[in-house]
Amino acid sequence: MIDERLWRQLEIPQPGSGRSVRRLLPESPHDIHLSVTHPGQRRMLLLRADARAADRVRRLLVDLPQTSGLSLSLSSVSPREFELQVSLTADDLREVFTPLVEDIAEVVRRTDTAESALEAAVRRFLHWQQLMRTVSRDGLGSDGRRGLFGELYFLRGYLLPSIPHDAALSAWTGPEGTPQDFQLLHAAVEVKTTTAKSPRTVRIANERQLDDTGVEALLLAQIAVDERRGGSGESLNAVVDSVRNRLESPHARARLDAQLVRVGYFPHQRDLYEEPRFTLRRTDVWRVVEGFPRIVESDLDQGVGNCTYDIDVSALEQHRVTTDEVTELIRGTDG
């Protein structure tokens, strides 16, 4: 992962104008670099490609929306070589820029050709633009705050005490858009957070969330909380700080910060998250096995998808698992 020390090394003043450059992912066939300009100290991600690849990606740059603090441009380095530049133009987004750069670089790494690498980089930049517009000045919406609280509560209460912290943070993949919020070596966990006083149903967002294809054990957790302004519960900031303070590994802390940014919790907006406060009412965890009431992709006719549905909690009692059983599954044993 990219850490602040690397940026600081690149920002060491240099005589005259120019830029410091460090290659990322040297095992990748793509020419990916971090860079800092001098004397302007502008942080950048650079992706070089030939003129043919650049010509194919130009259409994506037409009428590219503007995002305050970030820019994307395509520049000629030589008659046969071009450079896609992702630049940070506002210091208050520094803590956002590093996860953005890591994310784009990882997407590029998984591509096969220069053309697909450039296109993937542009499309991922557009994804981040959309995220930042969605979050806006008001921060995460109420559903986003509640959902993030629940995932961090589960991370703190179940994963961190059970497995090494680096593994626990690596398992938190929900911010990357995976079908379940946590994906471990032998298990996956989908976490739902509700403010219902006595939850009678669990809302499932799509037909992939409870699909256990390729997963040894799939768990569904529902965390019921009381949510109120000025209450005595725990704020979103408090649970973030509580998780971070438990982490002994710099790598785990960096992973936490990166995932928080991916979900839309931006460090420069912390003042928005002192309210509301959350107080736990109850936690229910069920194991998804044969006979569990659900809709999965293989059940659907061709052309049908994005199925949101509710499961009656009363139908799940036989699938309930204890805290000890959850811990065993997280650790990779099946009791």
Image: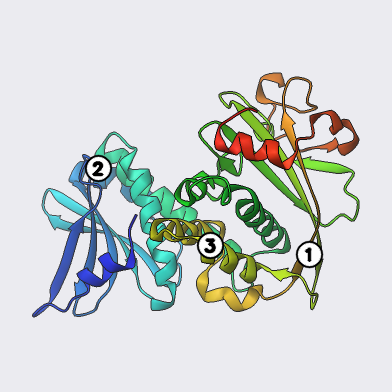
Relative to residue 153, is residue 265 drawn left or right?
A: left
Q: Residue at x 28, y 68 (%)?
A: 5
Amino acid type indicated by mark 2: Ala
Q: How is the image coloured?
A: rainbow
Q: Is 99 rendered above or below residue 91? A: above
Numbered disc 2: secondary structure: helix
Amino acid type indicated by mark 3: Arg
Q: Is 101 rendered above or below residue 307? A: below
Residue nearest the observer in this picture, 48 or 59? 48
The residue beneath circle 1 is 279
Sequence-wise, the earlier of marks 3 and 1 is 3
Residue nearest the observer in this picture, 80 or 200? 200
Q: Residue at x 90, y 56 (%)?
A: 197
The residue beneath circle 2 is 53
For label 3, count other residues whose C-alpha is less than 10 Å away and answer few (under 14), some (14-19) or many (20+): few
The residue beneath circle 3 is 246
> Quadrant where the C terminus lies?
top right
User: Which quadrant would residue 325 be assigned to in this image?
Assistant: top right
Q: Residue at x 44, y 56 (%)?
A: 252
> Quadrant where the N terminus lies?
bottom left
Residue 184, percent from left and from top: 53, 37
Mark 1 and mark 2: Cα distance apart in space: 53 Å
